[in-house]
Image (cartoon, helix red, strand yellow):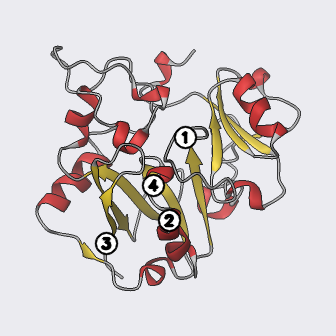
Amino acid sequence: MQNSIIYQGPSLLDGSPIVVVALVKSSNKKTGDMVQTYIIRADMDPLKASKYGLDFAVCGDCKHRGEADPDGTGKQAKKRSCYVTLFHGPLQVYKSFKKGNYKPAGDISGLARGRMVRLGTYGDPAAVPSHIWDALLKDSAGHTGYTHQNNAPGADVRPDLTMISADSLQDAKIAWQSKRRTFRIITAVSDKQSNEILCPASEEAGRKAQCNTCKLCMGSHQTAPSIAIVAHGNGAAYIN
């Protein structure tokens, strides 16, 4: 199977042109060898989109986007707390897309047959019509997925497919009342609640498993505790 385009069209969040690229191999140490999916703008690179605040098309109102800085000297938004490093995977995928290295997939489900899939390696899955994810996951071994768009107009939020990304304990409690599982960033292990467990792939949990074997972040269709993880990555300093 080859790296392929599985969706190209308007973002459900603001109508801007986006593209979803599925990479069939990965050396990511945390997730393991999963099919990785990048949701990026089709008309500008991720750094520019971040700097000008135009990454709303793929990230929605996620606070971890940081503050748009169109007049600044930086290459991306200020105080960006997202753990995804834009000039690594997202930028390289964009450049390859612009070079025409990816072709539209024929049988989308074939890309992930018997494999674990990461929905939104970069970008929010709710920006994409969920029938795309249903097709990709049809013959898969499972997936991980997270969304910040729980109440966003137009977003195709599927709590059965994705964890609700909670930015506060209050946000998490609202989701729990609706029987939705959450993935919550915390600042210390002591912040974890009784109905949460630490992400098994995290340093604090002893890196007991990779995402491709853990399979706990598959949304609310399974019965399992919610997940918490201590802030990490280059943007951790900006998380309160």
Q: What element carries label 3?
A: loop
Q: What residue sits 65% from the left and 20% below the top?
A: 187
Q: What residue sits 17% from the left and 69% below the top?
A: 101
Looking at the image, the residue that sits furthest to the right is 194
Q: How far apart are marks 3 and 4 (CA)?
A: 16 Å
- Image quadrant in which the N terminus is located: bottom left
88 lies left or right of 134:
left
51 up-or-down from 149: above or below: above
Q: What residue sits 29% from the left and 28% below the top?
A: 53
- Neighbourhood count class around disc 4 (C-alpha, 10 Å): few under 14, some 14–19, many 20 upward: few
Q: Where is residue 193 in the image (x, y as percent from the top left)?
A: 83, 29
Q: Distance between the residues labelled 3 and 1?
A: 27 Å
38 up-or-down from 178: above or below: below
Could you tell me if the residues under marks 1 and 4 are in contact, i.e. CB atoms within 8 Å? Answer: no
Q: What residue sits 67% from the left and 34% below the top?
A: 184
Looking at the image, the residue that sits furthest to the left is 99
- Neighbourhood count class around disc 3 (C-alpha, 10 Å): few under 14, some 14–19, many 20 upward: some
- Neighbourhood count class around disc 2 (C-alpha, 10 Å): few under 14, some 14–19, many 20 upward: many
Q: Residue 3 carries which label?
A: 3
Viewer-proximal residue among 188 and 54: 54
Q: Where is residue 177 in the image (x, y as percent from the top left)?
A: 84, 37
> Which dot, 3 or 4, sits closer to the camera?
3
115 up-or-down from 172: above or below: below
Q: How far apart are marks 1 and 4 (CA)?
A: 25 Å
Q: Residue 28 carries which label?
A: 4
Viewer-proximal residue among 63 and 141: 63
The residue tagged 1 is 149
Task: Tell me which numbered mark, 3 or 4, is placed earlier along the sequence.
Answer: 3
53 lies left or right of 34:
left
Q: Residue 34 carries which label?
A: 2
Q: How far apart are marks 1 and 2 (CA)?
A: 24 Å
What type is the residue that disc 1 sits on?
Gln
